[in-house]
Amino acid sequence: MENSDAGKEDLDLLQGLRRRDKEALGLVSERYGAFLMRTSYLFLGDRDAADDVVQETLIAVWDSVGRMPSDLKLRSWLFGILLNKCRMYRRSFWRRLKLERRVGKPHRIEDRRDGNESDRLESLRLALQQLDENLRTVLILRYEHGFDIAETAAALGLPEGTVKSRTHLAIEKMKRWMEKNHE
Amino acid sequence: MNDSNEQFEERLRQDLSSLADRVSIDNLEGKVGHRLQRRTMYRRMMVGGTIAAALLFIGYWITFVNPSFPIPQPSFTSTDVDKMITDAGMSTELLLTAQVLDKTPGGEKLALENYQYIIAKYRDTRAARQADEQIHNIYNRRTIQ
C-alpha cells in the first residue's frame, strides 16, 4: 500500500515536471534530496562536491524529464543521472584537482560521536575513495540503500553474477583497507 | 568466516549510514531555483549578445564591405547653399532688367546680351532657363519680321 502510494506520488511529480511546474521540482528535491545527497557524498567523499552534483542532477532532471524512459521508476532514473554526474564531476580536470585536494584532508566531524567512531568513519570515507568506481557504486547501493542483488543489477544494468562478484570484491577490499588502517 | 563476514557487512552498513549522516540538505530547493534562474539569465544574455553581434556585423558589412550600400554623402556645403541663394537672387534681378529692356524699343540687342550673360554666368538657375526661352523668342520674332 505504501509502495503504491509512493508510486502514485512519483507519477504526480513526473507529470508536474513534464508540465514545467517548478513546484514539482521543489517536491522532488524535498523527497529525494537526502537520498541524492547521501549517495553523492559517499561516492565523491566531499560535501561541497556532493552538494554541487546534487544541484546539477536536479537541473538535469528538469531538462530531460521529457526523455525519461517510461518503464523506469523515478528513484532509479534519479540514481542513474546522479551517477553520471558524479562520474562527470570526477572526470572534469579542474574539479578533479579540487576534489583530490579536499578528499585527502580530514573532514571536521560536526556530530557528537566519540573520537574512535569519528576516526573509523573518516577511515571509511577515505577507503571508499580508494575503491574502484564500479565497486563503490555497488557497495553504496547494496549497503547504504539496501538494494538486493536483483535491484542493484537492474539499477546498474548489469547481470546479477557481476553484481555478486563486485560486491564480494568490494567487501574484501574494504576489509583489507580497514584492517590495515586500524592496526 | 561467514559469521565474521556478516558482522563486517552489518558494521559496514551502519558505518555507511553514519558517514552519510554527516551531510544534510541545506536549502537545496532554493539553490537549484537560483541556479536555474542564473542559467536562464545567462542564456538570455547569450541570445542578446548574439543578436547584438549579428547587428554590428550587418552594420559593418553594409557600411564598409558591400559597395551597393554607399554612405550618402552630403551634396552641398553651407557655402554652396549661400552661393546658390545669391545666384538665384542676382540672376532673377538681371532677368527682370533684361525683360524690361526687351520691351523697350531699341533695347532688344541689350536684352539679348543680358540673357546670354545670365545663361553663361548663372547656368543652373531658373532665371537661366527663362533667359534661354527669351532668346528663342527674340530669334523667332526676328524670323517672322
Image (cartoon, coloured by chain):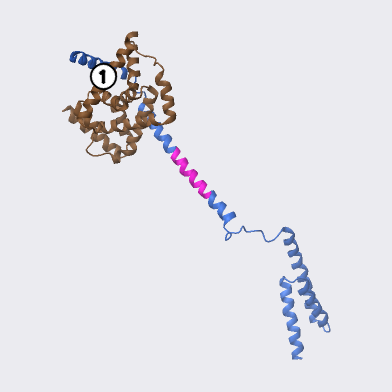
Chain colours: A brown, B blue
Secondary structure that dominates the magenta span: helix
Q: Inspect the magenta stretch and tell me whether residue B51 lies in it.
A: yes
Which residue in the rendered view is the most extreme toward the left?
A: A1
Residue A59 appears left or right of B134: left
Q: Residues in magenta?
A: B42-55
The quadrant the N terminus of chain B occupies is: top left
- In front of the other: B86 or A113: A113
At 25% from the left and 20% from the top, the residue drawn is: A171
Relative to residue A108, is residue A10 depicted above or below?
below
- Residue named by callout 1: A172
* Residue A40 shown left or right of residue B82 in the figure: left
Please state the chain letter of the residue tagged with numbered disc 1 in the rendered image.
Answer: A
| Quadrant of the rendering where the C terminus of chain B is positioned | bottom right
Q: Is residue B105 magenta?
A: no
For label 1, the crowd category at 10 Å Cα-Cα, with few meaning under 14, some 14 to 19 and many 20 or more, is few
On the rendered structure, is B91 left or right of A30? right
